Image (cartoon, grey):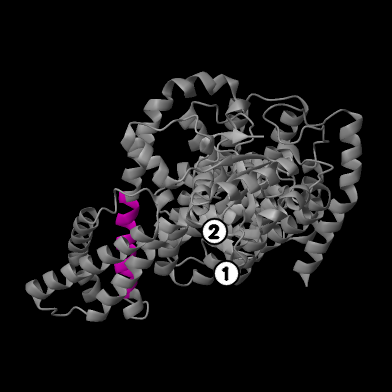
């Protein structure tokens, strides 16, 4: 009951005083400034963090047992709040803010609050400072879209509350539920379209509090070092991922990390066609899903570590996909010249690094598959003898699988262009490598002490993990491209092989600024079917009507085998509809022209008309 009271009071305090804070911010012109690196162009009042701070300090002082630990957290978080407040009102040098955060974190450690699961202070003290400062700035960077930072803070505080409640840490549970009520009350004014921003005083305040509560509220319940370190990282996975993503992509382009920008994960989701609300809600759900998965597996540390690694690899692949959707270079004039100078060399280097990462990822996945096979075979408990078998055989497993994978050409394919032939090749490679492993173990030890079921499970898991990770980019593209809103709106006339080829090229080539609205085909059996998620809307006669309903800009005629009369009819329909059109040439005709000595580029079949 106490927790419900704390949550409700926190909600209503912030809900009640935020309009007054907003009014004061407007009166004293404390509003966000428009700029190329800002998402919102209109001025929005700042200092929403004031209401969050008042609610937290007031309720912590009245409704919690004021232990020394809670008083220290209140004082330290207030210090970070005022540091952000000064920055919002007067402006502070980023280096000065960083120094202030480090000093406050050090004072917190002097009071005894630190990562105690590591018994060596020479490691635990700098790790604690790095964690607190990192998460504090992660939430500051995450405050880049209406409702995002406050909403993720709400999700994270609920998760910390659940962990703390289960582990019996009632002091941390009280602080976490107060934060969750406060952030939910603030979301009424901060969710899209936001009428007030929390400012640095709010984002840094929340980030600092959650970084401290995450280590206090989760390590007591973890049963080993790996779990204790992994749980808070997964609970705060979205701000960590966003900060890492922005830092890496900007560093690769020679752009300043500390500068504001429109190249965050949320912005790239919007560039794919998500609305701002959908992008923010997607990240809420993603964050909560990771947190609840962690909570479910907290009593199974080995499985939690495996799942944590798989989540990290999945986020890496998501980062690769979002990194391809780069439309934000214009926001950083300072770094543009450096980007252009290094573009060719960077392209080669990036390809090489990506190949290395693919190989390293496979090392991890092969290890996870083999280890998980033991876990599944022996119901999650691996005896010392089986662990010794695992350790002795793992190098052979990795070596044989890599030899077979390399021979089968798995490291010559490009993940973004993976197709059915590549999938079949992966199946062949995993089967062949498993057969070789079984043959080697049979010759060496005649399967003494080894379980045959382990190797069957290992083959299946290797197929799922190695094949699945290569299909992840394709999955992201197929799912997220359906939300795309930008680019010229086109229809493809011809729902056959040529049309399908064009659709794939448009989706794979970032330089082609088209959004495919649908297909048209005169074969009635193809109507209402979908090709890569794109619907066949009707026949060519429907073009004039659809051009108005769907606001179509251009049409691409992809019927290489069509007779001249049919093409003339379709082009006439395009002209009547006022739609520009182009024709995809017949492949046979193109190859015949090449054999004869060259293709005439002025051929009408390859030119665009209006």
Magenta span: chief secondary structure:
helix
Residue 522 appears in the rendering:
yes
Q: Badges 1 and 2: C-beta atoms under 8 Å apart?
A: no
**Number of dots carrying numbers:** 2
Please give the label number shown on residue 532.
Answer: 2
The residue sitting at 59% across, 38% down in the picture is: 513
Q: Which of the image's four quarters has the N terminus?
A: bottom right
| Direction from residue 197 to residue 468 in the image, left or right | left
| Direction from residue 405 to residue 174 in the image, left or right | right
Disc 2 element: loop
Please give the range of residues in magenta: 359-374
- Towards the viewer: 541 or 152: 541
Q: Earlier in the sequence, mark 1 or mark 2?
A: 1
Disc 1 element: helix
Q: Which of the image's four quarters has the C terminus?
A: top right
Q: Position of residue 288 (x, y in %)?
A: 62, 61
Residue 272 appears in the rendering:
no
Classify 181 as above or below 267: below
Query: Which of the 4 quarters of the picture holds residue 87?
Result: top right
Name, please, the residue furthest toward the left.
Answer: 443
Please give the label number shown on residue 167.
Answer: 1
- How far is the residue under mark 1 from the one under mark 2? 47 Å
Local crowd size for mark 2, using a 10 Å CA cut-off: few (<14), some (14–19), many (≥20): few
């Amino acid at each position: 009951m106490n927790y419900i009271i704390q949550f409700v009071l926190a909600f209503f305090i912030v809900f009640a005083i935020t309009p007054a804070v907003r009014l004061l911010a407007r009166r004293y012109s404390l509003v966000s400034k428009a700029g190329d690196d800002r998402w919102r162009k209109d001025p929005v009042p700042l200092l929403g963090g004031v209401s969050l701070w008042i609610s937290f300090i007031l309720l912590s002082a009245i409704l919690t047992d004021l232990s020394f630990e809670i008083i220290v957290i209140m004082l330290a978080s207030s210090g970070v709040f005022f540091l952000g407040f000064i920055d919002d009102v007067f402006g502070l040098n980023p280096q000065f803010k960083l120094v202030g955060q480090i000093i406050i974190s050090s004072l917190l450690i002097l009071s005894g609050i630190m990562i105690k699961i590591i018994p060596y202070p020479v490691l635990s003290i700098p790790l604690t400072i790095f964690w607190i400062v990192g998460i504090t700035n992660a939430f500051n960077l995450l405050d880049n879209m209406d409702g995002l930072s406050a909403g993720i803070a709400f999700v994270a505080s609920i998760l910390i509350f659940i962990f703390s409640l289960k582990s019996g840490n009632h002091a941390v549970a009280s602080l976490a539920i107060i934060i969750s009520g406060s952030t939910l009350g603030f979301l009424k004014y901060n969710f899209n379209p936001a009428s007030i921003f929390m400012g640095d005083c709010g984002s840094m305040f929340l980030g600092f509090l959650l970084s401290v509560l995450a280590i206090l509220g989760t390590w007591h319940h973890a049963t080993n070092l790996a779990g204790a370190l992994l749980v808070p990282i997964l609970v705060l996975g979205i701000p960590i991922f966003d900060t890492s993503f922005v830092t890496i992509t900007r560093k690769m382009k020679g752009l300043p990390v500390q500068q504001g920008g429109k190249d965050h994960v949320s912005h790239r989701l919007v560039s794919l066609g998500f609305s701002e609300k959908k992008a923010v809600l997607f990240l809420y759900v993603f964050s909560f899903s990771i947190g609840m998965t962690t909570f479910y597996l907290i009593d199974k540390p080995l499985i939690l570590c495996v799942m944590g690694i798989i989540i990290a690899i999945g986020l890496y692949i998501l980062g690769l996909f979002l990194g391809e959707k780069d439309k934000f270079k214009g926001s950083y004039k300072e770094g543009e010249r450096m980007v252009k100078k290094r573009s060719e060399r960077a392209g080669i280097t990036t390809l090489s690094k990506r190949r290395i990462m693919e190989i390293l990822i496979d090392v991890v996945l092969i290890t996870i598959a083999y280890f998980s096979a033991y876990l599944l075979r022996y119901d999650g408990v691996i005896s010392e003898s089986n662990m010794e078998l695992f350790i002795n055989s793992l190098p052979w497993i990795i070596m044989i699988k890599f030899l077979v994978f390399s021979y089968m050409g798995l490291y010559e394919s490009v993940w973004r262009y993976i197709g059915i032939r590549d999938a079949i090749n992966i199946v062949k490679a995993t089967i062949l490598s498993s057969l070789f492993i079984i043959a080697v173990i049979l010759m060496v030890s005649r399967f003494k002490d080894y379980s045959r079921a382990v190797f069957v499970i290992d083959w299946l898991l290797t197929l799922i993990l190695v094949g699945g990770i290569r299909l992840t980019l394709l999955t992201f593209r197929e799912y997220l491209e359906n939300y795309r809103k930008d680019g010229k709106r086109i229809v493809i006339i011809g729902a056959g092989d040529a049309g399908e080829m064009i659709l794939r090229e448009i989706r794979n080539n970032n330089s082609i600024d088209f959004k495919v609205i649908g297909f048209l085909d005169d074969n009635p059996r193809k109507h209402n079917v979908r090709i890569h998620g794109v619907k066949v809307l009707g026949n060519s006669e429907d073009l004039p009507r659809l051009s108005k309903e769907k606001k179509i800009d251009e049409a691409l005629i992809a019927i290489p085998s069509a007779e001249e009369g049919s093409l003339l009819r379709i082009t006439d329909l395009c002209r009547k509809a006022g739609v520009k059109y182009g024709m995809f040439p017949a492949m046979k005709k193109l190859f015949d022209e090449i054999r004869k000595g060259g293709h005439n580029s002025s051929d009408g079949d390859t030119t665009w008309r209006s």
